[in-house]
Image (cartoon, helix red, strand yellow):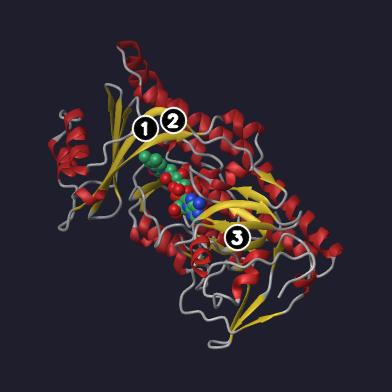
Amino acid sequence: MFSGENEVQCVKRKLLLEALGTFRYSTKAVSIEESEYFKLTEPSLRPRVVDQSNNSSATIKVSKFLSFCLEEVGAKRYIMEEVADIVIVGAGIAGLTTSLGLHRLGIRSLVLESSETLRITGFALTTWSNAWRALDAVGIGHSLRQQHQLIESGEGEIRCVRRKVLLEELERELPSGTIRYSSKVVSIEDESRHLKLVHLADGTVIKTKVLIGCDGVNSVVSKCLGFKPPSFTGRSAIRGYTEFKGGHGFEPKYMQFVGKGTRSGFFPCDDQIVYWYFTWSSTSQELEDNPAKMKQFVLSKRHNLPDRIKAVIENTQLDSISSSPLRYRHPWEVLWGNISKGNVCVAGDALHPMTPDLGQGGCAALEDGIVLARCIAAALMKTGNDDDNNDEDRVVMFERIEMGLKKFGKKRRWRSIDLISIAYMIGYIQESEGKIMNFLRDKILSSYIAGLLMKKSDFDCGKLTTIS
Ligand SMILES: Cc1cc2nc3c(=O)[nH]c(=O)nc-3n(C[C@H](O)[C@H](O)[C@H](O)COP(=O)(O)OP(=O)(O)OC[C@H]3O[C@@H](n4cnc5c(N)ncnc54)[C@H](O)[C@@H]3O)c2cc1C
């Protein structure tokens, strides 16, 4: 089949099957169309395999060696290569908000999620005025307000939102097929200056013009931009939520308890559900993963809580308790780091992992999504040309995208630094021990901290228009 400069080897069928890592069952390749790639002598060849049984076809990237063997083995195993204009890694708060923001602006994206379904870690989160502005911008604020109580705070809008409900609302508004589950991104490489190749764990390779990393604290994309993994703060958290079928009877208020190097908070989400968290200083990131022991641990540290509050923890089902080490990115790394590089950028926890002391990580991820959608849409619309078939068009398109992502980085850098730093400082003050620190915190700093919480939530990410 190949000759001249191409490699021809005789291979044992069994050895070849073992060497190939990627499978697609029930897919019989019935013909391989010759393409210009066959004439090239580059390291990879891309024949087009046509499956006439279901009229589908796919361009497959195979090495010279594998393409030679394709016919030999009936082409039942190969590496898929696909194309998507905008790829978002991670179907969490940041990824889904960005995708929905783009959709509202008439732009399609593909969201790759490693889990089999929406990943709901942490059960609930506090959402402040800034989050509600972002939720209104993507058009799901009204529906979420119907399902979550307003927490009495005197100013601003605070609600404790169930993560499941939030992510499902975002997903519901997206065109079907936008999120692709069980798609873990393992590496990223350049195909050319204009295109990135996104490699998935199942061997699929997706070619894209824009790559957005919303893949959380352990982000693969932020690593590719040069960020180090986030640092452990020396603190950890246990979170839970409790459902009271007949109603919990608490007023819609935030209840916080601090002291002895620990901190805990209780928020009603609606009439029946109370979300709670407990944070403490811990030397190790290796946490207890037995929920019964986690519950016992929290109760042992919080034995002086009022009985009604203690009952919230006692009544928590074991599958509604989880623990996590608290990590953050040093503010100076965000200051000097690449929030974007060429056609790649990061948002959400992939950009600004922070301690939960301001309750702003998820809210900032919502802000990111709106700003980023606007910046990308403005960049793509300015090209005024969907066809980038020639080199000149491709360069123009790439430069617009690069500028759009840089603009996003510029808009989000100081906001990220501010939130990370203030959250860390508040956590430090709240969990410090000692008589002097307790006095300062309880008598002087508490109203200052309350003021900071409100001030940091008073941020408007703007609406979804293409003027960025
Ligand atoms: C104890 C605690 C309490 C908190 N409380 C609050 C609060 O009250 N209010 C608030 O606003 N924030 C809070 N936060 C912060 C908030 O949880 C995060 O900031 C928010 O979830 C970040 O969203 P994200 O979409 O950036 O990342 P994530 O929610 O982590 O989503 C990332 C997604 O990417 C997927 N993914 C990861 N790697 C890959 C890969 N390689 N390929 C494909 N998919 C991948 C994951 O499966 C996941 O679905 C808290 C955090 C903690 C730890």
**Label 1 lies in ligand 1 vicinity (Cβ under 8 Å):** no
- Which of the marked residues, 2 or 3, is nearer the chain's N terminus? 3
From the image, tell me which residue sits under label 3.
87
Q: Is residue 154 visible?
A: no
Tell me, yes or no, whether the two marked residues, 2 and 1, touch with CB atoms within 8 Å: yes
* Amino acid type, mark 1: Gln
Q: Looking at this view, is 122 or 458 the one in front? A: 122
x 60%, y 65%: residue: 109
* Amino acid type, mark 2: Phe
From the image, tell me which residue sits under label 2.
232
Residue 222, position as x, y percentages in the image: 58, 43
Tell me, yes or no, whether the two marked residues, 1 and 3, touch with CB atoms within 8 Å: no
Measure the C-alpha gap from mark 2 to mark 3: 29 Å
Q: Looking at this view, is 249 or 346 the one in front? A: 346
Kind of element beneath mark 3 = strand
- Which of the marked residues, 1 or 3, is nearer the chain's N terminus? 3
Residue 48, position as x, y percentages in the image: 66, 76
- Within 10 angstroms of label 2, few (less than 14), some, or many (20 or more) residues? some
Q: Residue furthest top?
A: 436
Measure the C-alpha gap from mark 1 to mark 3: 32 Å
* Amino acid type, mark 3: Val
Q: Is residue 37 visible?
A: yes
Residue 136, position as x, y percentages in the image: 51, 59
